Image (spheres, rainbow, N blue to C red):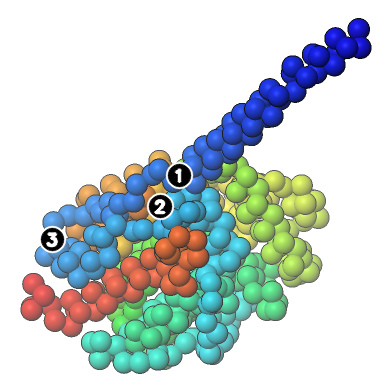
Amino acid sequence: MSAQVEADVRTISPEMPAMFDGMKLAAVATVLYVIVRSLNLKCPTAAPDITCQDTPLNRYLVKSCPILTKEYIPPLLWGKSGHLQTALYGKMGRVKSPKLCGLRMYLPMPDGATATFDLFEPQGVHSTGDDITMVICPGIGNHSEKHYIRTFVDYSQKQGYRCAVLNHLGALPNIELTSPRMFTYGCTWEFSAMVGYIKRTFPQTQLIVVGFSLGGNIACKYLGENPGNQERVLCCVSVCQGYSALRAQETFLQWDQCRRLYNFLMADNMKKIILSHRGSLFGMSSSNMEPADLSRLYTATSIMQIDDNIMRKFHGHNSLKEYYEKESCVHYIHNISVPLLLMNSSDDPLVHQSLLTIPRTLAEKKQNVIFTLTLHGGHLGFFEGAVLFPQPLSWMDKVVVSYANAICQWEKHKPQCQ
């Protein structure tokens, strides 16, 4: 019996290594397949899809900004993944971001709040020789010290632009709130105060309005609220905004593109910002907050819950729907008459494809609007690079400044341009 077992073992043993090798090959093939699919390595690169009317200005802008008509090529190994582009922006911002030397300004608001913004003077003469200021509104909970803002400001300064960057109310950890209120999705008060200061202090300057993500909503809403807000404004650029918070809230509860996970992570970040100002927001006698609101904040798992329990109460909105309706730029953006560039990415995991019908329809109806949609870029990513490591300056930075330069040249030499 023992001899028979030994014979069977000798018979089976030579086949075992081959079987294990086959399993290893299958496992490797599976991993490679998952990597190729998740990183979209087989997805082609392409030039941005541009929607606009055929006008002399739009033809001039497209011709003067060749970067808009050339294919955007992200880093080879990971740049075609909107998730990785977004994650790298969120964690890293930009590589080798420069140190900026600016002046922090404090503006008292009528309700007791104190708005702050950072002012950076140009590092050279603008190509037109004119005094031009970029007024910049960052993304949600962001400020002038974020890496992507520093990189963009440094690049703009070297092109001859003065830059004013709004620090969202409550976003800077070392600046205490002076009233029981912080920034919201569409409150334009602080941005308006900053723009007003720039206009008064530099009466000869002209303005380029730039907004990133939530900042794009605020910038467009500000310009559309009052025609007077567009005085001395040459153009506006909005990057990666969602246009309608009311329509976006439904998509943020869906799991496709991991949107529900992003919702949770954004809510967690908002919790930290709010709790860092707990004494001001909940302790002041003029506060609209109650102890129950603080309890609901701790258990919130979505941005919508935080907006409903906390954010809408800063301005006395009666419901979440009312808050989203009144704070979204979709109801104001059609009032903008200055040149307007709207930029989005198809693989942005935070902005659902259904929301992109808003800027596309606007560009089809209004002569002053150009809508640019890229295949890749994620949310405020738009990294460029050969294989693995991205360049410090992104495709987004180059497009915004190139468009601004073209607008300035058009205004300076309009007859020749036409």
Query: Quadrant location of the N terminus?
Result: top right
Name the residue beneath numbered marker 1: 40
Q: Residue furthest front?
A: 3
Q: Residue at x 63, y 61 (%)?
A: 314
| Viewer-proximal residue among 215 and 292 | 215
The amino acid type found where label 3 is placed reads Thr
Residue 100: x, y in percent?
53, 86
Query: Quadrant location of the C terminus?
Result: bottom left
Q: Secondary structure at mark 1?
A: loop
Residue 223 lies in what quarter of the image?
Answer: bottom left
Q: Residue furthest right?
A: 2
Name the residue beneath numbered marker 2: 376
| Viewer-proximal residue among 290 and 203 | 203
Q: Earlier in the sequence, mark 1 or mark 3?
A: 1
Q: Residue at x 62, y 45 (%)?
A: 261
The image shows residue 183, relative to residue 33, as above or below, that is below
Query: CB atoms at circles 1 and 2 under 8 Å apart?
Result: yes
The amino acid type found where label 1 is placed reads Asn
| Viewer-proximal residue among 379 and 175 | 379
For label 1, count other residues whose C-alpha is less than 10 Å away and answer few (under 14), some (14-19) or many (20+).
some
Name the residue beneath numbered marker 3: 55
Q: Nearer the viewer, mark 1 or mark 2?
A: 1
The amino acid type found where label 2 is placed reads His
Residue 388: x, y in percent?
50, 61
